[in-house]
């Protein structure tokens, strides 16, 4: 096995699936999970050139014991873990004053707490290896805010703080921690926007379009690679210039 070994949370659809596909295409081994097995996951499992490099578990990211077991089984199967991409996330929009507590708890658990738990277990193995790269998928909303997304913004901002602190904590063992802050992407996550909202975002974006999964995958590849060996604690904004 010559490729990298990478865990990607929430890799069955949307941006996560695009990241998994990109890693598999370049010859890496990937372990991912979500609450249900999608048609995309079934395709990877049945692909003769990828099946031996792909591992999927049908688990809830809020199940701490299952997450710990996933990390352990990934290490057991592929013998090491070179990278972690904390991608799993949900957005629940609405005025905070009227937001159901369950929605707030869900965003905190899935977007932020699960990223910390995964990083805890993965970094323990990376410390032994004295190498590794952790990538946290945040959002431009973490820094700029957006009306109706206070809870989401809070969790994504938390990921940026986690990134900077872990970069200092793990750097002495050659483990790098960086974040990517995408703008609005043309994925399921933006499905709740109506056409007028999308058009407003496009008008405010110098490059004149929504982002795509393909805009993010190369940045993930770069941050996992030796080309970024002297980069840690940084946030890479990929938003078509919307925050300029």
Image (tube, rainbow, N blue to C red):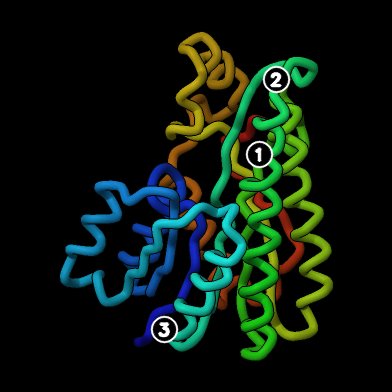
Question: Pointer 3: what residue?
Answer: 78
Indicate the secondary structure of the residue bearing disc 3: helix
Q: Residues within 10 Å of mark 2 (few under 14, many from 20)?
A: some
**Is the C-beta separation of discs 2 and 1 under 8 Å?**
no
Question: Relative to the observer, which residue lies in front, 176 or 99?
Answer: 99
Residue drawn at the location 66% of the way across and 39% of the way down: 107
**Is the C-beta separation of discs 3 and 2 under 8 Å?**
no
Question: Relative to the observer, which residue lies in front, 203 or 87?
Answer: 87
Relative to 18, residue 6 above or below: below
Indicate the secondary structure of the residue bearing disc 1: helix
- What's the mark number on residue 148? 2
Q: Quadrant of the C terminus?
A: top right
CA distance separating discs 3 and 2:
42 Å
Give the mark, 1 or 3, whose residue is nearer the N terminus: 3
Question: Relative to the observer, which residue lies in front, 114 or 29?
Answer: 114
Where residue 50 sits in the image (x, y, percent)?
Answer: 25, 70
- What's the mark number on residue 107? 1
Indicate the secondary structure of the residue bearing disc 2: loop
Q: Quadrant of the N terminus?
A: bottom left
Residue drawn at the location 51% of the way across and 9% of the way down: 196
Nearer the observer: mark 2 or 1; the answer is 1
């Amino acid at each position: 096995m010559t490729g990298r070994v990478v865990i990607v949370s929430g890799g069955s659809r949307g941006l996560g699936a695009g990241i998994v596909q990109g890693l598999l295409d370049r010859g890496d081994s990937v372990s991912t999970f979500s609450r249900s097995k999608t048609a995309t996951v079934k395709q990877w499992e049945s692909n003769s050139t990828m099946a031996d490099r792909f591992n999927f578990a049908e688990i809830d990211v809020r199940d701490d014991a299952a997450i710990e077991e996933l990390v352990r089984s990934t290490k057991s199967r592929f013998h090491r873990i070179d990278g972690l991409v904390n991608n799993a996330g949900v957005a629940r929009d609405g005025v905070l004053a009227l937001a159901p507590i369950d929605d707030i708890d869900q965003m905190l658990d899935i977007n932020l707490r699960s990223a910390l738990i995964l990083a805890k277990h993965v970094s323990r193995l990376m410390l032994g290896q004295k190498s590794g790269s952790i990538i946290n998928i945040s959002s431009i909303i973490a820094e700029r805010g957006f009306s109706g997304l206070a809870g989401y913004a809070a969790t994504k901002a938390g990921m940026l703080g986690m990134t900077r602190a872990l970069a200092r904590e793990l750097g002495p063992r050659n483990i790098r921690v960086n974040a990517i802050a995408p703008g609005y992407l043309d994925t399921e996550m933006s499905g709740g926007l109506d056409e007028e909202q999308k058009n407003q975002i496009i008008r405010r974006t110098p490059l004149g379009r929504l982002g795509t999964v393909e805009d993010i995958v190369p940045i993930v590849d770069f941050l996992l690679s030796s080309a970024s060996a002297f980069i840690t604690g940084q946030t890479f904004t990929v938003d078509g210039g919307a925050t300029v």
